[in-house]
Amino acid sequence: MDDDLDTPGALAGIFELVTASHTAADAGEGDRAQVLARTAAVLAGALGLGLVGEAAEVDDATARLVAERDSARASVTSLGRRVAGTN
């Protein structure tokens, strides 16, 4: 039973879906991001893992952290383009 269900592989697949969902959301592909996120949630549920955090509102502290992350990502992307000469 240890390897028959390949639970580590299943969890890795779910995390890949979550990453793809975040990437799609960051790229402005909201519909695709939602489909990927829902698929990850369904698969997690099939493994008995309930997902929490379905609240529509984000608290101020979290919103600030997200804004800081987005700003840092934009700076790194901009710097990478300048270094590569692709502006």
Image (tube, grey):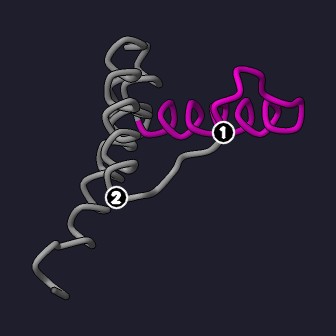
Q: Label 1 amino acid? A: Gly
Horizontal and vertical percent position of residue 45: 39, 48
For label 2, the residue is: 47
Q: Position of residue 33 (x, y in %)?
A: 38, 23
> Is 68 part of what is drawn in magenta?
yes
Q: Is-magenta flag for residue 59? A: yes
Q: Quadrant of the C terminus?
A: top left
Please report the residue visible at 25 percent of the width from the left and 71 percent of the height from the top. Answer: 7
- As helix, strand or loop, the secondary structure at mark 2 comes to loop
- Residue 64 position by quadrant: top right
Q: Which residue is mark 1?
A: 53
Q: CA gap, disc 2 to disc 1?
A: 18 Å
Give coordinates of residue 28: x percent, y percent.
43, 13
Task: Residue at 70% x, 34% y: name it.
Answer: 66
> The magenta stretch spans which residues?
53-80
Mark 2, residues whose alpha carbon is within 10 Å: few (<14), some, or many (≥20)? Answer: few
Q: Nearer the viewer, mark 2 or mark 1?
A: 2
Looking at the picture, which amino acid does disc 2 mark?
Answer: Leu
Farthest residue, direction right: 60
